[in-house]
């Protein structure tokens, strides 16, 4: 595939997706290919940060170029000169990029569309931003202009970096890895950084937007109740989280295959769209199949290193309200293992993208039934499903052992030994090398449902582990109300034993809470009681911050003495609160931060994890991956 056709595919798929609950296809669905297509785009990559002045308040924008041609754009403000006033829930969409570089002169034209995806759901305006730039070493100067309701123009200044310079400044250091959903092990904690980070997320510096375009998460997704929203950048590509290893960022997502067209009144609605991107977005809502996409992104620049696309490989599913887990990859020993929403499993060479082995997949997406993702322990892939657990050889995918069914699995290291915890209404500890069951315990708490014990959503994605400790929440009934307590179990010899229960009896919005463990402390929060810091060894409350209330599907992650808390991860808004979390302390740092990108979330069961490695915050947005620099900058010296 040529670089031009690769960029065309990325631009087009940035606005496309589909639904499993759709009209029948107008033509026969082609057979699923036997293998994915591997794309490895070439050409020199550059990234630039520019300031547009002269049109009112200065606007900062990001521009990426491959072989001198613009391939990605990001504005830190949605209100650009030439566009009408934003309203509702605004998103600035990049519909197309054109241009070239000759003799140090960069000409770029970026087609932009301002939309609102909720109250109202419609296009607000369009503009084309044109840049005429002159490069001198790393400095850029020139002019800009916009079309639209109120055309404007002005001056540009900025900096441009080639790949070597960007890597020297921003490469992610060796060992700074986030290899699966839960971070380094199973505590929602990243690798120790050991250097100063910002004390307020308002000081986070945007670094790049990925060249790869991924589609919306569930939280901003289109739904059958309001299909026309599909026209405005909200077609879903699932809510998998990014993972990081060896300076590279990986993401599993999907794109609709375009195998079906709307019928009847929906076809009439399609004809009413007068914008090609909006028309195609709505059309692809009705697809029945989706392409499985695995993207590898350079952590210093955001460029696409490789992308594997398996056409038609999974069922296509579009909804705002997905109440299942979200398949997230795992990486170890140079192998990336990916599961998809049709429960296929794939192993790729992490550096080259070559497919090493695969098993299953190709069917429909089970309603609200997803996996946390595979677990890698040594040379074994542990694949936990409701039908049983498989141990597979990491290199070949060959089955090694069969084990009990489980909702998900966690990797634990206890006294230097690798263990896997299978999570469900029964907690089962196994040896990952052999699959041998070492210990069992019933999940605590629960309420009576017609004679059956219902433990609620505690055994879901938010159960975490640190050393021998297993920490989650139990659901109990108090005064006819379901409330939550935080508990810990401890692995001792060949038993899983109760360690403590902190009887907070807090209200859990949508039935669950988020948890992370760091520095011997447990962090969590409740809707009515606020945020908690709890001693891991004793279960005693160290500090309660009642004003920091938790809401739907929250997530906590920790790195060093920082906790990053997103109190609501269900309705499309990414707002993150930073806390200081030294041993014995728990205090907010700065205000709740709204990052300046097109944001998204998952929905009801398993959040999209924010990733922090080497002083960088990596976030999945509505249309790609975004990276922010949290490294504390040296204070400017005075004269």
Image (spheres, rainbow, N blue to C red):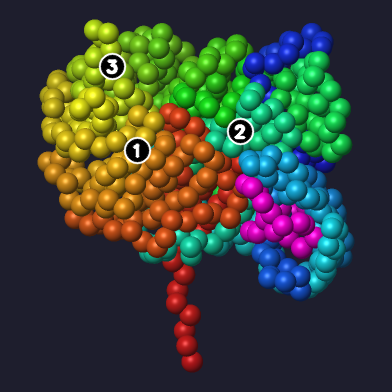
Q: Quadrant of the N terminus?
A: top right
Q: Which residue is mark 3?
A: 454
Q: Main SS type for the magenta part?
A: loop
Secondary structure beneath dot 3 equals: strand
Q: Which residue is mark 2?
A: 221
Dot label at residue 133: none
Which residue does the image show at 31% across and 31% down from the upper left? 463
From the viewer's side, name the closer residue of 3 and 498: 498
Image vertical order of residue 364 relative to residue 143, above or below: above
Please identify, in this view, whether the residue under mark 3 or under mark 1 is nearer the observer: 3
Dot label at residue 514: 1
From the viewer's side, name the closer residue of 590 and 560: 590
- Report if residue 85 lies within the magenta region: yes
From the viewer's side, name the closer residue of 334 and 568: 568
Mark 3 burial class by Cα count in 10 Å: few <14, some 14-19, many 20+: some
Counting from the top left corner in percent of width and height, residue 374 is at 44, 24
- Report if residue 575 lies within the magenta region: no
Q: Quadrant of residue 167?
A: bottom right
Residue stretch rendered in magenta on the structure: 65-90
Taking the view exactly as shown, the residue that stands out farthest to the bottom is: 639
């Amino acid at each position: 595939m040529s670089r031009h056709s690769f960029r065309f595919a990325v631009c087009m798929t940035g606005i496309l997706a589909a639904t499993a609950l759709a009209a029948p296809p107008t033509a026969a669905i082609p057979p699923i290919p036997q293998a994915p297509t591997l794309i490895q785009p070439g050409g020199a990559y550059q990234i630039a940060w520019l300031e547009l002045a002269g049109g009112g308040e200065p606007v900062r924008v990001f521009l990426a170029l491959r072989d001198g041609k613009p391939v990605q754009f990001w504005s830190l403000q949605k209100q650009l000169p030439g566009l009408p006033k934003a309203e509702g829930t605004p998103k600035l969409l990049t519909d197309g990029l054109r241009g070239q570089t000759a003799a140090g002169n960069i000409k770029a034209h970026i087609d932009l569309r301002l939309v609102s995806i909720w109250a109202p759901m419609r296009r607000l305006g369009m503009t084309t931003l044109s840049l005429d730039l002159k490069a001198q070493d790393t400095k850029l100067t020139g002019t800009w202009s916009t079309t639209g309701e109120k055309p404007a123009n002005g001056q540009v200044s900025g900096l441009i970096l080639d790949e070597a310079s960007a890597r020297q400044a921003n490469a992610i250091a060796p060992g700074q890895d986030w290899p699966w959903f839960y971070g380094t092990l199973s505590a929602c904690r990243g690798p120790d950084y050991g250097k100063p980070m910002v004390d307020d997320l308002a000081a986070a510096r945007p670094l790049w937007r990925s060249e790869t375009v991924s589609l919306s998460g569930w939280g901003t997704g289109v739904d059958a109740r309001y299909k026309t929203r599909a026209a405005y950048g909200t077609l879903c590509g699932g809510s998998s989280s990014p993972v990081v290893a060896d300076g590279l960022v990986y993401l599993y997502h999907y794109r609709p295959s375009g195998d079906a067209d709307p019928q009847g009144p929906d076809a009439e609605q399609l004809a009413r769209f007068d914008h090609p991107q909006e028309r195609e977005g709505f059309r692809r809502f009705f697809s029945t199949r989706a392409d499985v996409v695995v993207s590898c992104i350079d952590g210093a620049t955001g460029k696409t290193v490789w992308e594997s696309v398996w056409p038609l490989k999974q069922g296509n599913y579009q909804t705002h309200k997905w109440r299942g887990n979200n398949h997230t990859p795992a990486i170890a020993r140079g192998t990336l293992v990916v599961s998809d929403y049709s429960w296929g499993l794939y192993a790729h060479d992490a550096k080259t993208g070559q497919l090493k082995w695969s098993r299953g997949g190709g069917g429909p997406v089970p309603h609200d039934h997803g996996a946390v993702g595979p677990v890698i322990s040594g040379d074994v892939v542990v694949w936990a499903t409701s039908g049983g657990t498989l141990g597979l050889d990491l290199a070949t995918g060959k089955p090694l052992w069969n084990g009990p069914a489980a909702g998900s699995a966690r990797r634990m290291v206890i006294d230097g030994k690798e263990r896997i915890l299978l999570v469900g209404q029964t907690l089962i500890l196994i040896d990952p090398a052999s699959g041998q069951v070492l210990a069992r315990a019933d999940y605590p708490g629960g309420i009576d449902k017609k004679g059956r014990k219902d433990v609620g959503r505690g055994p879901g994605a938010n159960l975490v582990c640190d050393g021998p400790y297993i920490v989650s929440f139990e659901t109990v009934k108090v005064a006819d109300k379901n409330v939550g307590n935080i508990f810990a179990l401890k692995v001792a010899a060949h038993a899983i034993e109760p360690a403590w229960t902190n009887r907070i009896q807090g209200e859990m919005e949508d039935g669950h809470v988020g948890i992370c463990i760091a520095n011997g402390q447990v962090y969590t929060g409740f809707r009515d009681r606020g945020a908690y810091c709890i001693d891991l060894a004793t279960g005693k409350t160290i500090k309660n911050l009642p004003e920091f209330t938790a809401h739907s599907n929250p997530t906590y992650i920790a790195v060093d003495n920082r906790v990053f808390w997103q109190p609501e991860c269900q309705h499309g808004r990414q707002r993150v609160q930073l806390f200081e979390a030294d041993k014995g302390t728990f205090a907010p740092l700065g205000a709740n931060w709204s990052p300046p990108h097109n944001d998204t979330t998952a929905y009801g069961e398993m959040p999209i994890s924010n990733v922090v490695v080497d002083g960088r915050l990596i976030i999945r947005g509505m249309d790609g991956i975004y990276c922010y620099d949290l490294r504390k900058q040296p204070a400017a010296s005075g004269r």
